[in-house]
Image (cartoon, helix red, strand yellow):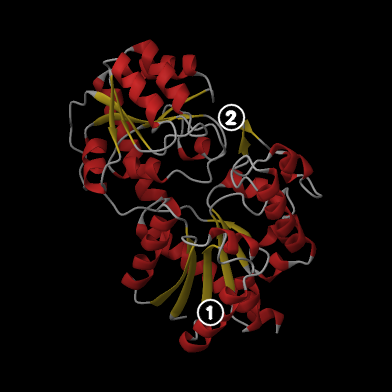
Amino acid sequence: MQKVLIIHTYYKLKGGEDSVVENEMELLRSNGLTVELLSFSNSGNTLLKLAQLPFNFSSYRQTKAKIASFKPDVVHIHNLHFSGSAAVVYAVKNTGTPLVMTLHNYRLLCPSGSLFHNNTLFMDSISPGFPWLAVKEGVYQNSSLITFWISLSMYLHHKIGTWKRVDRFISLGIHSKELFSDSALQPYADRLVVKPNFVYPGPDTIPDIQSSYYLYVGRLTEEKGLKVLLAAFAENQLPLVIVGTGPLADVVTEYAAKYKNITFKGEQKKKQIVDLLDHAKALIFPSLWYETFGMVVIEAFSRGIPVITSNHGNMKNLVTDQYNGLTFNVGSSEDLSKTVTEFEQMDRSKKNVFRQNARTTYVSNYSPERNFQQLLDIYKAAISMKLYRR
């Protein structure tokens, strides 16, 4: 196997999925594989792209043309929503090329894409049948009309067996795999494999830095647990630095003005984020939804920074309580405050053990070397599955 075609639809704003695509392409190329990217974009004429969500004929033609010219050994899809559409799956399989698909979110299960709505988990769409409650609640952008259209497309593709054309699905965590296996994707559960994301390593040695603050990096949204985070640090008065942008930016600004222990730095470039991580006591990850993965968590681990996270979903598998960080009861600002205070009161030697364990976790599970071998094995399995079916 020498040639891999990556297919990805870019959202209007750059996100974590885009970074994963870039990382994996660089990883494959650095290991001698020939990689090309076929990209689609959701920018411009959103209404037309939404209308073509069930089957985008332009994406179908572009995919078939790209495969005909590049002749890949395997195709790896990352995101199809909106402008790629499931038409890409049909284009790939009509050429007879083995197909792998990474499940970065829950869009194949629920039109919300996150299993989260109105500040709480929304699990109704996992059940078989048309997701009428999701439509009623307007789980996508609070619009029942758009939610209905997305739901109809999703439901039709489940009914006609579109996803049986995927040879291997990549789930980013054990908990996500369990959710997918108990959903409409259950018939293909044997094709689900767990392969986490990775980041490139930090320094080989962990500097003994006398850190002064705790750090949050990420989107400023309800599902990320921002209000839980702000309430906790308003209570414990410990230094907190917040980096990111999003709908709750004004709320964060208000807290930073009122509580002098909270510093809001807004959006920062990669270099500045890395520097902030290197000088943090711990990363705080208070997410309320079932994160499919947490890139910033393994970024922290790569630099020997412990993580304090909510204790549910994939997070409880990423962070081992009392080993490479601490966990707290999801959604509880009181328990988060208590947990951070517990970490604050640990002696320096115990904190250093946490730091070493964080780095060990990264090397063992989330390094480029390990990830490349996992990815290669998945590609080979998809190719073997295709050969077996002939």
Percent position of residue 117, x then y:
62, 35
Residue 338 higher or lower than 208, as above or below: above
* Position of residue 124 in the picture relative to residue 46 (left or right): right
Q: In which quarter of the image is residue 254?
A: top left
User: Reading the chain from its start, which is encountered first: label 2 or label 1?
Assistant: 1
C-beta proximity under 8 Å, tags 2 and 1: no
- Which residue is the extreme one toward the right? 129
User: Is residue 238 in view?
Assistant: no
Residue at the location (51% across, 68% down)? 377
Disc 2 crowd, CA 10 A, few/some/many (<14, 14-19, 20+): few
Residue bearing the label numbered 2: 119
> Real-space Cα distance between discs 2 and 1?
39 Å
User: Can you tell which mark lies on residue 364?
Assistant: none
User: Can you tell which mark lies on residue 62?
Assistant: 1
Residue at the location (64% across, 71% down)? 87
Percent position of residue 291, x then y:
53, 41
Q: Is label 2 in a helix, a strand or a loop?
A: loop
**The C terminus appears in which quarter of the rendering?**
bottom right
User: Which of 207/280 is in front?
Assistant: 280
Residue 204 higher or lower than 72, as above or below: above
User: Is residue 372 in view?
Assistant: yes
Q: Is label 1 in a helix, a strand or a loop?
A: helix
Percent position of residue 386, x then y:
64, 78
Hey, what amino acid is under mark 2? Asn
Percent position of residue 1, x then y:
47, 80
Q: In which quarter of the image is residue 265?
A: top left
User: Which of 66/197 is in front?
Assistant: 66
Hey, what amino acid is under mark 1? Gln
